[in-house]
Amino acid sequence: MHTAVFLLNRAPTAALDGKTPYQAWYGKKPPVHFLKVFGCVVYIKQVRPHLAKLDDRGIKVVFIGYQDRTKAYRFFDHEAARVYVSRDAVFDEDARWNWEENLGADDRLPFSIEEDHEVQMRHAPEPTPAPVTRS
């Protein structure tokens, strides 16, 4: 949700005659040089202590957004089921994360609104018609 609002504040809107909300508030165009493709593959630097000289230092993760009040990005590691916040990252914006390829036997795809809505509708009680009374 935060990423969507962050991007909408930097996109032109008809309500402000083609200006961005950021531009209306601060009086200058927003910086966009740091924007990245959502859902792309990223390699972040591993910062755990005591790495050997030839140990892998990169973790393959997926880009999920921007961190509040910092210049950092947010990443999701599917294998560890963990969210990382980092600035030390190499973006592969041409590659997309393949959720189906990276699923285990008991994993599910990320939620979808349609599936959740269908489950709620299946378990909802059927409405009973009101009895008709004649006077």
Image (spheres, helix red, strand yellow):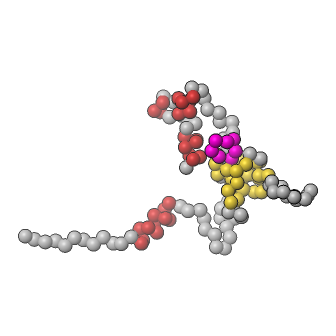
Region of the chain picked out in magenta, as a range? 67-73
Instruction: Confirm whether the magenta stretch covers residue 53.
Output: no
Q: Residue at x 36, y 72 (%)?
A: 125
Q: Residue at x 16, y 71 (%)?
A: 132
Q: Number of marks in the image?
A: 0
Q: Is residue 135 above or below residue 34?
A: below
How far across and how far down the image is residue 101, in percent? 69, 65
Give the side of residue 103 with respect to residue 119, left or right. Answer: right
How far across and how far down the image is residue 29, in percent? 60, 29
How far across and how far down the image is residue 43, in percent? 77, 52
Q: Is residue 37 above or below residue 79?
A: above
How far across and how far down the image is residue 67, in percent? 65, 46
Q: Residue at x 27, y 72 (%)?
A: 128
The image quarter containing residue 53 is bottom right
Q: Residue at x 50, y 65 (%)?
A: 115
Please identify the residue farthest to the left as the structure is shown.
135
Tell me the quadrant of the picture where the C terminus can be found.
bottom left
